[in-house]
Image (tube, rainbow, N blue to C red):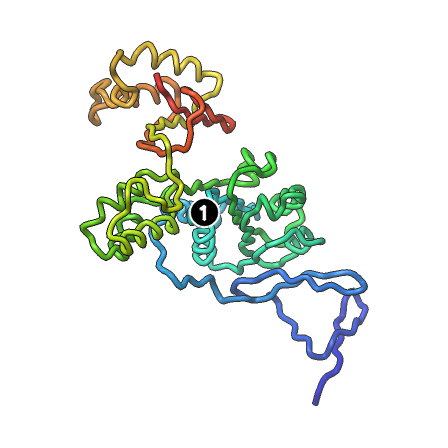
């Protein structure tokens, strides 16, 4: 017998609903797309199950994301976040093709919660997301575009003041041109993972899997070393070019982004910005003429019970920071000898002293 109508009881009032309606406590697990139903009376939002989990029909090479996945999972399941019913915000930032979206999907699968994909700033989105009565991952790809004109909505969602259940907000961005109230605010965005060049192991494994003549491996690596940015798509093009033509010419017409400069970058994390001039003066005074900053930092400073400390340890101790090298970074252009990019108390220096 066909049931044409059902009734729900809400605050002691019965309301009719279609007879083919099925009631669920939650939508269940899986990956969900937001659906907007429009009518003469307005619109409402719902969820459409599009998959049990994210699937990949291609091999995924090492993205260097084990550390961030471990950190996010541990933080999410910690007593601090569980007992505090706190949302957790994470940004994967990088140029197109660097693997951030794939990484976000891998992390979503690993967390094992329902995933809600937000692809537009729908009317009523904030209330809808906050009203969800189950823990879930909210995945927002290209967040700076999706919320270009609705930054306040994104802020309020992540704040989760009226949350029914806590949410993991996972955002991917091509650049960090987001609302400044998101950046430098770990209560909203706790972790930012930068995606850039392919890892050495990813390059090596891809070449091993796809290069027909392995005697050409060095030529492929040489071509990769000249790139402004290395991605799987670009590496594939280089390997395909060698497989087709048996070589890749130094002045190849292949449409790939080549760098114009290669420099060593010294990164100082935790350096107080008002001490940057003091740091420059210290290096100018202590690095001998004819010696690079890199070589000086590697020189022995002192012997300790645990071994040998070098000048890099000296610098870190003196300026209460951490420093490390990013060698042979390819750049399209260098506008000055001393370039400083500061994000609150972290500074990135490229030194030519």
Q: How many labels does the image show?
A: 1
Do we see residue 66 in this rendering?
no
* Nearest to the observer: residue 76 or residue 323: 323
Residue at image position (39%, 24%) is: 350
Residue 296, above or below 113:
above
Do we see residue 276 in this rendering?
yes
Q: To which residue does mark 1 refer?
A: 72
Other residues around mark 1 within 10 Å, as few (<14) / some (14–19) / many (≥20):
some
Q: In this view, does 198 lie to the left or right of 152?
A: left
Residue 191 in percent (x, y) is at 48, 41
The image quadrant where one finds the N terminus is bottom right
* Nearest to the observer: residue 222 or residue 138: 222
Residue 11 in percent (x, y) is at 78, 64
Residue 229, above or below 236:
above
The image quadrant where one finds the C terminus is top left
Determine whether the residue tagged by mark 1 lies in a helix, strand or loop: helix
Q: Residue furthest bottom?
A: 1
* Nearest to the observer: residue 300 or residue 330: 330
Q: In which quarter of the image is residue 68?
A: top left
Residue 131 in percent (x, y) is at 66, 56
Q: In which quarter of the image is residue 18?
A: bottom right
Q: Which residue lies furthest to the top in this view?
A: 285
Residue 53, above or below 304:
below
Q: In this view, does 192 lie to the left or right of 61?
A: right
Residue 222, above or below 134:
above
Residue 232 in percent (x, y) is at 37, 50
Q: In which quarter of the image is residue 307?
A: top left
Residue at image position (54%, 66%) is: 50
Residue at image position (39%, 19%) is: 319
Q: Is residue 269 left or right of residue 10?
A: left
């Amino acid at each position: 017998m066909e049931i044409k109508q059902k009734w729900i009881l809400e605050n002691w009032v019965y309301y009719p609903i279609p007879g083919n309606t099925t009631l669920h406590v939650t939508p269940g697990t899986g990956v969900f797309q937001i659906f907007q139903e429009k009518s003469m009376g307005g619109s409402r939002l719902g969820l459409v199950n599009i998959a049990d989990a994210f699937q990949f029909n291609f091999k995924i090479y090492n993205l260097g994301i084990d550390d961030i996945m471990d950190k996010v999972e541990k933080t999410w399941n910690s007593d601090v976040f569980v007992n505090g019913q706190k949302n957790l915000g994470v940004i994967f930032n990088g140029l197109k093709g660097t693997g951030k979206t794939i990484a976000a999907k891998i992390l979503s699968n690993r967390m094992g919660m329902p995933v809600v994909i937000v692809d537009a700033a729908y009317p009523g989105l904030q209330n809808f997301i906050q009203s969800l009565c189950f823990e879930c991952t909210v995945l927002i790809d290209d967040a700076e575009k999706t919320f270009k004109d609705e930054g306040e909505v994104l802020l309020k969602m992540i704040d989760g003041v009226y949350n029914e259940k806590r949410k993991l907000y996972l955002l991917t961005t091509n650049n960090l041109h987001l609302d400044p109230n998101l950046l430098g605010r770990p209560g909203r965005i706790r972790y930012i993972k930068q995606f850039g060049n392919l890892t050495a192991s990813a390059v090596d494994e891809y070449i091993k899997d796809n290069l027909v003549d392995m005697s050409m491996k060095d030529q492929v690596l040489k071509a990769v070393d000249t790139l402004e940015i290395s991605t799987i798509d670009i590496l594939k093009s280089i390997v395909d070019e060698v497989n087709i033509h048996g070589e890749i010419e130094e002045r190849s017409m292949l449409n790939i982004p080549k760098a114009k400069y290669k420099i060593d970058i010294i990164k100082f994390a935790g350096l107080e910005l008002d001490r940057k001039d003091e740091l420059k003066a210290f290096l100018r005074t202590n690095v001998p003429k004819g010696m690079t900053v890199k070589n000086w930092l590697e020189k022995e400073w002192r012997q300790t019970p645990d071994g040998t400390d070098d000048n890099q340890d000296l610098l870190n101790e003196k300026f209460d920071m951490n420093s490390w090298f990013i060698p042979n970074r390819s750049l399209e252009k260098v506008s000055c000898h001393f370039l400083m990019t500061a994000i609150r108390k972290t500074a990135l220096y490229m030194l030519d002293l």
